[in-house]
Image: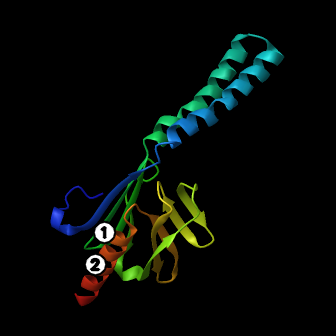
């Protein structure tokens, strides 16, 4: 997000992370891969330098992304310019939906237990911790769904910003 913004520029701000149960679930799901790799490689090659290095690579590839996933967070802001979404560590800079692209805003619900960033046939979905959110219909582009713990506040902030933008 733009660090130079003042509090008055921001109409809505929210930070979301994965649900609390996601960390233990990811750890449990990450365990079978390395165990199967160890069993397969050591069972076939025995305990050699090559087998140990192969096991180390598999364990690193399986376990290394976990800290990034567990610390991921989505920052949503509505400013005088439009809607901004930044999902760390997947976005280096915020994804912007300027007010001049927005046609409509609706509070909606999505399927539960589908977290993260997804491209669907209906457009982008950003859902870190909530099945409720706001569907933003855009001109000549697919809609964007932004999950929110406070979807009605987010929709109201976008609508107010849109009205202010159109009065300019």
Quick check: 136 above or below 125?
below
In the depicted view, which residue is nearer to us: 91 or 33?
A: 33
**Residue denoted by label 2:** 161
First in sequence: mark 2 or mark 1? 1
In-image side of 23 versus 7 (left or right): right
The quadrant of the image that shows the C terminus is bottom left
* Figure quadrant of residue 166: bottom left
Mark 1 surroundings: few (<14), some (14-19) or many (≥20) residues within 10 A: many
* Figure quadrant of residue 85: bottom left
Report x, y in % for residue 89. Answer: 44, 47
Quick check: 106 above or below 88?
below
Residue shown at 58% from the left, 56% from the top: 114
Label 2–label 1 contact, CB within 8 A = yes
Residue shown at 67% from the left, 27% from the top: 34
**Residue denoted by label 1:** 78
Label 1 secondary element: strand
Report x, y in % for residue 10. Answer: 23, 66
């Amino acid at each position: 997000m733009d660090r130079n913004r003042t509090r008055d520029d921001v109409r809505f701000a929210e930070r979301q992370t994965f649900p609390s149960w996601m960390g233990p679930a990811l750890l449990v799901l990450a365990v079978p891969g390395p165990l199967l790799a160890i069993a397969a490689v050591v069972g076939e090659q025995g305990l050699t330098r090559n087998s140990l290095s192969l096991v180390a690579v598999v364990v690193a590839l399986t376990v290394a992304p976990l800290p990034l996933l567990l610390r991921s967070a989505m920052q949503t802001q509505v400013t005088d310019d439009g809607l901004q979404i930044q999902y760390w560590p997947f976005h280096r800079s915020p994804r912007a939906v300027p007010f001049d692209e927005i046609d409509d805003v609706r509070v909606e619900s999505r399927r539960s237990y589908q977290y993260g960033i997804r491209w669907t046939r209906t457009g982008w979905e950003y859902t870190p911790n909530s099945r409720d959110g706001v569907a933003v219909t855009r001109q000549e582009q697919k809609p964007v769904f932004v999950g929110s713990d406070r979807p009605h506040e987010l929709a109201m902030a976008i609508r107010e910003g849109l009205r202010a933008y159109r009065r300019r």
